[in-house]
Image (cartoon, grey):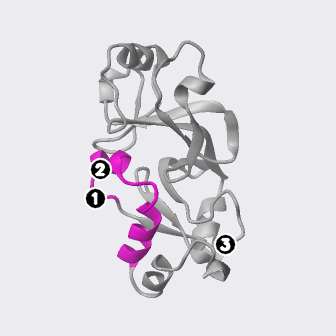
Amino acid sequence: MNTGKLLVATPSIIGDFNFHRSVVLLTNYKKSGSVGFILNKKLEYSLDEVMEGINAKFPLYYGGPVEQDNLFYIHTLGDKISNSIQISKALFWNGDFKSVNYLLKTGKLNEGNIRFFLGYSGWTEGQLEEEIEKKSWEPFEIKSGLELIKMSTNEIWRECMAALGGDYLLWSNTPENPSAN
């Protein structure tokens, strides 16, 4: 497993509110534990509603059940946001919020180059490997980090499941709540 990969929640995770039909970007993978952000769970409020002094109406996403009162972000801006942590060739994680605030005020940020999260997804030592072994998650290689931030949150899980193929192809077409079918 490597930083920069996606984790796609499999149907065996049904019933887990936090991760049902989730696609997680793994931003930090170490033997001691891992960190990632759920990409496809948009919240009903925007950045300006949770941050004082911010006038930008960027959507917020539920990053996961850990530290839900904290703001995190992934972006494609590299060193334009100082102290960013590189995830992949084109993707970066967090960095100096003063840089983000400056880029917001000057109009240099848009939904195509940054995504904001409340909370993150975290795993302790060995936990993620165990969950992958139990088939709760399927690792998925991303084609382009630049496209990842722009992907439709409504379709990303289905697209990943279809791309995984096999038995997952069937699940990609099932409704969110099969009993409502």
* Image height of 47 relative to 163, above or below: above
Callout 2, which amino acid? Glu
Secondary structure of residue under mark 1: loop
- Pair 1/2: label in front: 2
Q: Which mark is residue 147?
A: 2
Magenta-colored span: 142-164
Q: CA distance from mark 1 to mark 3?
A: 27 Å
Residue for badge 3 = 14
Answer whether residue 32 is visible to the viewer in this image: no
* Image height of 126 relative to 48, above or below: below
Q: Which mark is residue 143?
A: 1
Q: Which mark is residue 125?
A: none
The image position of residue 171, as x and y in percent, is 50, 81
Residue 177 figure quarter: bottom right
Left or right? Give the position of 54 relative to 86. Answer: right
Q: CA distance from mark 1 to mark 2?
A: 8 Å
Q: Which quadrant is home to the C terminus?
A: bottom right
Which residue sits at x=61%, y=61%? 128
The image position of residue 49, as x and y in percent, is 60, 26
Left or right? Give the position of 43 relative to 84. Answer: right
The image position of residue 108, as x and y in percent, is 30, 22
Callout 1, which amino acid? Lys
Q: CA distance from mark 3 to mark 2?
A: 27 Å
Secondary structure of residue under mark 2: helix
- Mark 1 or mark 3: whose residue is earlier in sequence: 3
Which residue sits at x=47%, y=85%? 170
In the image, residue 129 lies in the stretch drawn in magenta: no
Left or right? Give the position of 38 relative to 144. Answer: right
Secondary structure of residue under mark 3: loop
